[in-house]
Image (cartoon, rainbow, N blue to C red):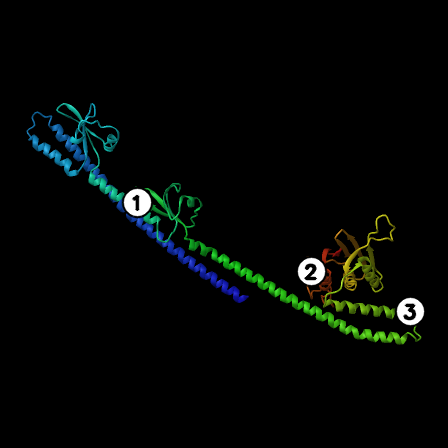
C-alpha cells in the first residue's frame, strides 16, 4: 500500500508540473499578443496623426481655392484670369478632392458639371457635410463650397481599417484555441471575443489575471483569457488521482481488516475446540468416579453435587464445541434460559450480590403466568452470554450490589437489559470493551465480551451492545433477539 501511495504522489506531482508548464506557455502567448497590440496601436496612432494632418491640408487647399475665386471680384485684378482658373482646377485635381459648389440661396449645384442644376439634398448632402463648408461671393452672387475626403485618403483609410480589424481577429482567433475576450476600461462592455460564442460568454470563467492594453483611440482595454480544455482537464486530474489513492487505501484497509478478522476467527475457533478437547478428559474421569462411588458409603447428596458439576462441565464442553461451527437454533423460551443461568450463578456468587429478574406477566393473569418470550436460540450459548455479563457485573460491583435483568418485547424483537450498580466505565474504556484482548482486570484475558457479542450478533443474528455506563453508578448491556 505504501508503494501505491508513493506512486500516486509522484504521478500527482508530475501532472501538476505539466499543468504549470502549459499555463506558463499560455500566459507567454497572451503576453506576446498584448505586446503585438501595443506595437499595432503605435502604428494606429501614427496613422491617426497622418489623417489629421491630411485633413488639415485639404482644408487649407479648399481655403486657397475659395480665396482665389473671391479674388475675381476685385475690379483692379491684374492677374491673368485663365491662369488663375487653371491653378484652381490644378489644386482640386491634384488632391483628388471631390467638391460641390452650390448657390447659397437655393442650393442649386453649379460645379461639377455632371451635377449642375441639381439640388444638394438628401444622401448627397449628408455625404458632403462631413467637413465644414466655405461660404464666399463670386461677382456678387453668394456661393457655398462643400468637399469631402480625398479619394486617395478614403482608400488608404479602408485598408488601414481592415488591417486593424484583422489585427483584432488575430489576437482573438489564436492558434491554441484559448477563449479570449477584450473588455473596455470599465470591464462591462465587450469590444471583441474569440474562440467562443455569445452563449458561451455567459458561462465563461476567467481564472487568469487580465492584461491591460491601449486601443488605437487611446482608451484602455483589458484582455481576459481562459484556460484551454487540456489545462482544465489536467487541473481536475490531481483530484482524480487523489480519489483513486483514497479508494486504494480504503480497499487495502478493508482487505487488511478482513484478513485480521479471519485470523481472529480462526484463533477463536481453535481456542474453543482446544478447550473442549481439554475438558473432555476430566469429564470422562469424573463420570467413572461417579459410577464407582455410587455404591459406596458416600451419601446421595454428595453424588448429586458431583452430578451438577458434571452437567456443568458437559455444558461448557457443548458451548465451546459450538464456537467453531454453526450452532443449531431452536424456538425456545428466553425466560427459562435466563432463569437457568441465574440459578446456577446465585449459588456461586457472594451473598451480598442480589439478582432481580423481571419478566412481565400475561395480561389479566396471575403473577405466575408469564408472557412467552419465544425466539430461535441455542440455549447453551445464550446462557453462556448471560453468565458472562453477570460475572462481569459481579466483578464491577466488587461482590456487593444488585444485578437487574429486565425483559420486554414487541411484535418482532425481544429486549433483555442487564444492569448493575458497579463502578461504571469511562468513555475511553467504553470504546474498547468489545476489542479482543482488551481488559481492565488484573488477571483477565479480554475474551468474555468479544465472545458474547460474537454469539449474539453472528450466531443468533441479534445485537449485543452497551446501552449506557455512568462512572460511579453502574452499566447496562442490552441484548436484542429477533423472534423470527
Q: In this orientation, which residue lies closer to the viewer: 365 or 463? A: 365
Location of residue 375 in the rendering, given as x and y in whole percent from the top left corner:
77, 57
Tell me the crowding category of disc 1: few under 14, some 14 to 19, or many 20 or more residues within 10 angstroms, Cα based: few
Image: 101 above or below 332: above
Residue 435 image position (x, y, % from top left): 68, 63
- Marks 3 and 1, how far apart at CA: 119 Å
Q: Position of residue 231 (x, y in %)?
A: 43, 55
Residue drawn at point x = 78 percent, y = 68 percent: 318
Say whether residue 443 is left or right of residue 361. Answer: left
Pick whichever, 354 or 336, lies toward us: 336
| Viewer-nearest of discs 2 and 3 | 3
Label 3 sits on residue? 301
x, y (%) of residue 15? 45, 60
Q: Is 301 displayed left or right of 77 in the figure?
A: right
The answer to which image quadrant residue 282 occupies is bottom right
Name the image quarter holding the N terminus. Answer: bottom right
Work out how far the residue at label 2 is from the one at label 1, CA to CA, in angstroms.
78 Å
Task: Check contact, mark 2 vs mark 3: CB within 8 A.
Answer: no
For label 2, the residue is 429
In the picture, residue 266 is in which quadrant?
Answer: bottom right
| Pointer 3 local density, CA inside 10 Å: few below 14, some 14–19, many at least 20 | few
Which of pointers 2 and 1 lies earlier in the amino acid sequence?
1
Q: Earlier in the sequence, mark 2 or mark 3?
A: 3
Going by the image, does 46 lie left or right of 233? left
Question: Dot 2, how many residues are within 10 Å of its Cα: few (below 14), some (14-19), or many (20+)?
Answer: few
In what quadrant of the picture does the C terminus appear? Answer: bottom right
Asked which secondary structure carries label 2, the reply is helix
| Residue carrying label 1 | 165
Q: Is residue 323 visible?
A: yes
Whether tag 3 and tag 1 are in contact, CB under 8 A, the answer is no
Q: Residue at x 7, y 27 (%)?
A: 77
Question: Which marked residue is nearer to the observer: mark 3 or mark 1?
Answer: 1
Amino acid at each position: 500500500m505504501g508503494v501505491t501511495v508513493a506512486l500516486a504522489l509522484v504521478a500527482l506531482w508530475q501532472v501538476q508540473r505539466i499543468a504549470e508548464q502549459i499555463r506558463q506557455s499560455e500566459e507567454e502567448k497572451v503576453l506576446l499578443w498584448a505586446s503585438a497590440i501595443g506595437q499595432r496601436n503605435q502604428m494606429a496612432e501614427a496613422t491617426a496623426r497622418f489623417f489629421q494632418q491630411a485633413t488639415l491640408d485639404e482644408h487649407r487647399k479648399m481655403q486657397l481655392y475659395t480665396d482665389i475665386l473671391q479674388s475675381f471680384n476685385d475690379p483692379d485684378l491684374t492677374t491673368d484670369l485663365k491662369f488663375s482658373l487653371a491653378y484652381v482646377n490644378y489644386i482640386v485635381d491634384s488632391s483628388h478632392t471631390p467638391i460641390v459648389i452650390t448657390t447659397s440661396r437655393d442650393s442649386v449645384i453649379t460645379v461639377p458639371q455632371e451635377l449642375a442644376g441639381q439640388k444638394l439634398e438628401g444622401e448627397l448632402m449628408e455625404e458632403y457635410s462631413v467637413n465644414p463648408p466655405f461660404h464666399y461671393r463670386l461677382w456678387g452672387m453668394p456661393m457655398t463650397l462643400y468637399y469631402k475626403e480625398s479619394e486617395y485618403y478614403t482608400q488608404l483609410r479602408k485598408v488601414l481599417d481592415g488591417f486593424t480589424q484583422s489585427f483584432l481577429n488575430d489576437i482573438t482567433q489564436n492558434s491554441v484555441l484559448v477563449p479570449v475576450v477584450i473588455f473596455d476600461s470599465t470591464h462591462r462592455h465587450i469590444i471583441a471575443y474569440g474562440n467562443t460564442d455569445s452563449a458561451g460568454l455567459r458561462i465563461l470563467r476567467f481564472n487568469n489575471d487580465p492584461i491591460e492594453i491601449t486601443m488605437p483611440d487611446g482608451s484602455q482595454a483589458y484582455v481576459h483569457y481562459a484556460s484551454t480544455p487540456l489545462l482544465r482537464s489536467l487541473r481536475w486530474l490531481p483530484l482524480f488521482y487523489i480519489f483513486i489513492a483514497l479508494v486504494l487505501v480504503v480497499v487495502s484497509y478493508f482487505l487488511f481488516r478482513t484478513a485480521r478478522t479471519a485470523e481472529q476467527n480462526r484463533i477463536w475457533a481453535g481456542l474453543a475446540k482446544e478447550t473442549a478437547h481439554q475438558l473432555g478428559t476430566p469429564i470422562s474421569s469424573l463420570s467413572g468416579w461417579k459410577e464407582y462411588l455410587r455404591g459406596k458409603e458416600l451419601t446421595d447428596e454428595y453424588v448429586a453435587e458431583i452430578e451438577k458439576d458434571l452437567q456443568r462441565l458437559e455444558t461448557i464442553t457443548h458451548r465451546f464445541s459450538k464456537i467453531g461451527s454453526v450452532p443449531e437454533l431452536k424456538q425456545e423460551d428466553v425466560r427459562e434460559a435466563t432463569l437457568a443461568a441465574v440459578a446456577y450463578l446465585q449459588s456461586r456468587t457472594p451473598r451480598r450480590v442480589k439478582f432481580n429478574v423481571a419478566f412481565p406477566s400475561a395480561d389479566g393473569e396471575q403473577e405466575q403466568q408469564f408472557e412467552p418470550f419465544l425466539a430461535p436460540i441455542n440455549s447453551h450459548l445464550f446462557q453462556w452470554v448471560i453468565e458472562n455479563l453477570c460475572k462481569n457485573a459481579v466483578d464491577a460491583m466488587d461482590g456487593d450490589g444488585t444485578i437487574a435483568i429486565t425483559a420486554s418485547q414487541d411484535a418482532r424483537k425481544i429486549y433483555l437489559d442487564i444492569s448493575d450498580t458497579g463502578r461504571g466505565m469511562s468513555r475511553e474504556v467504553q470504546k474498547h470493551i468489545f476489542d479482543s484482548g482488551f481488559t481492565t482486570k488484573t488477571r483477565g484475558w479480554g475474551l468474555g465480551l468479544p465472545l458474547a457479542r460474537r454469539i449474539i450478533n453472528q450466531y443468533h443474528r441479534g445485537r449485543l451492545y452497551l446501552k449506557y455506563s455512568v462512572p460511579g453508578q453502574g452499566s447496562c448491556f442490552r441484548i436484542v433477539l429477533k423472534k423470527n
